[in-house]
Amino acid sequence: MALDAPGVPLPLATEAREPAQPSTTSTTGTTGTTSTTSTCNSPRMSDPSRRAPRRQVQARVPLTHDSLAARGKLEAGSPDAAAAGRLLEMQRATSRARATLLSQAAVFWVDRDDPDQADDRAEADLAVAIALRTTTSRATRLLNDAHLAVDLLPETFALLAHGDMPSEWFDKVLRGARDLTVTQRAEFDEIVASWDIASIPADRFSDELRLLRSWYDAEGARTRAEDLRDVVLERSPCDDGTATLRITGPVPEIHAIAQHLDAAARAIQAQQRHAVEHDPGRTPEGGAPIPFDLDGAVARDGSAMSLAELRYAIITRTALGTDGVEVPRPAHRINVVVPVLTLMGLSDAPATYDGVVPLPADMARSLAAAEPIWHRVLTDPTSGEFLPLPADRYRPTAEMVEHLRLRDPVCAVPSCTRSTSSDAENDHIEEFDHVHPERGGPTSIANLHRLHWGHHDDKTRRRIDPERTSDGSTTWSIGTSPRVRISVSPRRDLISPIVARALVDSWDRYQWTLELDALERTGFADRFLREGGPEDPFLDDEAPPPLEFEEYGDPPF
């Protein structure tokens, strides 16, 4: 796993780290998840007397600047050959920087299998996340990779640190080694390090690594498909108002779901076509209902829904069974915050779904039109700050909680991305004094925020300590003996200041137009121009020709 800026060292590490002895556990998992499994619980234990085959993996010619130019059929000494040489050196520098990052991060490793060190793990993850300006989940993956690389794969890590192994290749090594046993991993590390990593081409490395890994897969190292069952919500990278629900599981199970869904969609589509063909003049209000015509579009348009539309409708409109387990109602409503000018159609400023996900203006207007009840939320037009409601008791009012959720749609702890729609609690930054409430810790917006319950527990145990300042920002100290301190500005509505500035600019232009109209009506503008007017070279007969914009298209005004 590589962070966005792999060359940034952690400023927090101040001590050298000795490679750890091989542990009795091996790390398994997929992207975004990490779990640990005892080697004795592997699906099938490998025979320790069997060793993976060792092949001689050697380049025909050592990779140098000259041989690189020859491989790329570049003329020796040409600018292209020099540029290729610089790219090679940049690749080696990137690898060394990646090794530095992993080495520094490994200092923060805390055993993931020791339940007594859960607090230390959370504290280390948070400190690393803040230092690298990333999320806690990415920091966790970085620490897992750092431990695996520095402590458990020392020989291949040395190639990365020397610059011989590209960072991309090392990622493949990490993926290949994660779910191996201790013995297999040591052998895997030794074999890969014996290859001519500094000179072999990328396709040769990938083929040899795949072949070596297949040997261990045959020995039972592969994780069972049943252990990888998961459902993950993924946001669109381009903020187009869409999201993806990814379901992972054994091929037969996923294939069976897909077949059942496809068969259901085809059956409903056939019934819709039959209904339309036998009663083409049917309206949504008359005749027998068309099956699954949820929005009346089939009756209105006279055509059945597509299979893609029906598959989606079946999934989203079907009740999920829970085998008799009662599912509690959501503790909070999901807020779609829409600027009032967007609702009126006077602006296309985006809305936000649950305080985080941007929504296009037309989607926001459509959602708002379907809701019978709207809640007005006031914000400061210049700063975008949500205007608070007063309270003077320990438990915040429902209105205050909704206000906090607008301001903290995710946990207020820096780098935490957990939503506060669920599994979150209201927290007094300055502790509420239950015996003498008047002595401090008021129940007010200025002294409250929303925290994921785990981080709320960390705050109670003084693992993290927030302090709210007079300007509304919060300074966080991480660690019982603080490792990191960071100040975070209050979250605001980003759209309000933009819309306010646009309105002011529009009003100024309107006032200027009125003044010009008044000058023209009184004849002052014509008289001013006749008597000399402004000294403008473009009004002169000898003015230079207008600028040409052919190369860049239309003029930028």
Image (cartoon, rainbow, N blue to C red):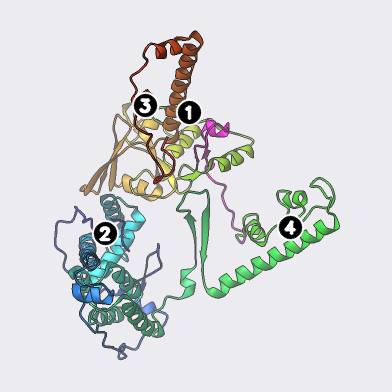
Residue lying farthest to the bottom in this orientation: 49
Q: CA distance from mark 3 to mark 2?
A: 54 Å
On the image, the x and y values in percent for residue 1 come to 32, 64
User: Mark 2 vs mark 1: which is more N-terminal?
Assistant: 2
Q: Residue 205: percent from the left, percent from the top?
A: 31, 78
Which residue is under mark 3?
Answer: 538
Which residue type does callout 1 highlight?
A: Leu
Query: Which one is earlier in the sequence, the residue at label 4 or at label 2?
Result: 2
Residue type at tag 4: Ala
Q: Residues within 10 Å of mark 2 (few under 14, many from 20)?
A: some
Residue identified by numbered label 2: 6
- Of circles 1 and 4, the one toward us is 4
Residue wearing tag 4: 304
Residue in the foreground of this view, choosing between 459 and 229: 229
Label 1: state its secondary structure. loop
Q: Which mark is residue 148?
A: none
Q: CA distance from mark 2 to mark 1?
A: 42 Å
Q: Specify start and end residues of the magenta stretch as a single range.
A: 323-351
Q: In front of the other: label 3 or label 2?
A: 3
